[in-house]
Image (spheres, rainbow, N blue to C red):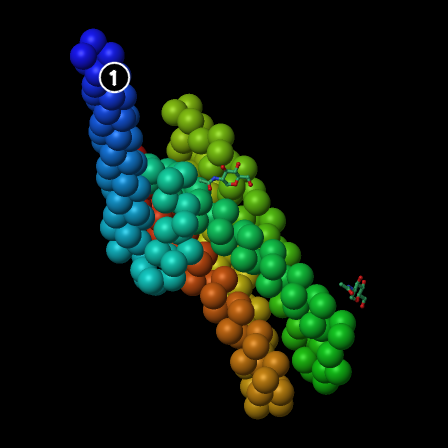
Amino acid sequence: MAISLRFNHHVLTSLFIAITLATVKSVHTTTEATTTTTNTEFVKSSCTFTAYPRLCFASLSTQASLIQTSPKLMAHAALNITLASAKATSAMMVRFSNSSRLKPREVSAMGDCIEELGDTLDELRKSIGEMGQLSGSNYEVYMSDIQTWVSAALTDENTCTDGFEGDDMNGKVKVFVRGRILVIAHLTSNALALINHFASIHG
Ligand SMILES: *[C@@H]1O[C@H](CO)[C@@H](O)[C@H](O)[C@H]1NC(C)=O
Ligand SMILES: *[C@@H]1O[C@H](CO)[C@@H](O)[C@H](O)[C@H]1NC(C)=O
């Protein structure tokens, strides 16, 4: 009898501990899930300030846990993604222009475009640098720099695309380059919109 009671007591204790742990775990998981949802919702609602909200969400929802609900981190992450994408495109265009049999007119347009993408990379890198150091005392100057550089990056991308206009260009090359640059330009436009949004609520 005594043994059976002790046994039952142990069983009950273990059961109690198991239930307690399960409850703690479930509360914890629920909190995490709620936070994840909140972060993702924040990214989604911030994307409504951009001209390409679907691209914005597709490119930034994976960064939701990093961004949390900070408009500043949202703008910073958008710049990071734009830089990474512009870097990849630039490298791809260098390879493409070296390996393909392009007409002289295309080689020349490609060369100009690669140069303009290089300027874009510089402008994005400088913007990211100042974004990371933005503080109360330098806010006005840095924010103005960032807005200027990101706008310049957008102009450089459009100049690159313009070089591929005209009927003397190979259709495939034209479509390929314009398609890639268009994505970069849209990502840049989105980043600028998120920067301007952050600036507007910062005051
Ligand atoms: C942006 O990239 C830098 C380094 O490349 C990283 O340290 C930083 O956490 C990133 N920030 C966001 C918000 O993605
Ligand atoms: C492409 O060609 C240029 C010279 O035309 C050369 O400087 C560069 O290293 C080459 N890049 C690659 C990735 O092959």
Residue 184 falls left or right of residue 72: right
* Closer to the camera in the image, 165 or 63: 63
Residue under the point 53% across and 74% down: 178
- Closest to the observer: 33 or 66? 33
Residue 25 sits in quarter = top left
Q: Is residue 148 visible?
A: no
**Residue occupying the far front of the picture:** 1
Comparing 114 with 139, the one in front is 114
Place of residue 19 in the rendered image (x, y in percent of width and height, measured from the top left): 22, 27
Residue of label 1:
7
The amino acid marked with disc number 1 is Phe
Which image quarter is the C terminus in?
Answer: top left
Q: Residues within 10 Å of mark 1 (few under 14, many from 20)?
A: few
Residue 11, quarter of the rendered image: top left
Residue in view at x 21 percent, y 16 percent: 4
Residue 173, image x, y percentages: 61, 81
Give the left or right position of residue 110, taking residue 28 as reference. right
Residue 197 image position (x, y, % from top left): 30, 46
Q: Is residue 3 visible?
A: yes
Residue at figure coordinates x 42%, y 56% from the top left? 59
Q: Is residue 26 above or below residue 52?
A: above
Circle 1: element type: helix
Q: Quadrant of ligand 2?
A: bottom right
Which residue is rendered at x = 42% and y = 27% of the image? 135
Quadrant containing the N terminus in the rendered view: top left
Query: Quick one: which residue is furthest to the top in this view?
Result: 2
Above or below residue 164? Residue 197 is: above
* Rendering coords of residue 76 (x, y %): 44, 42
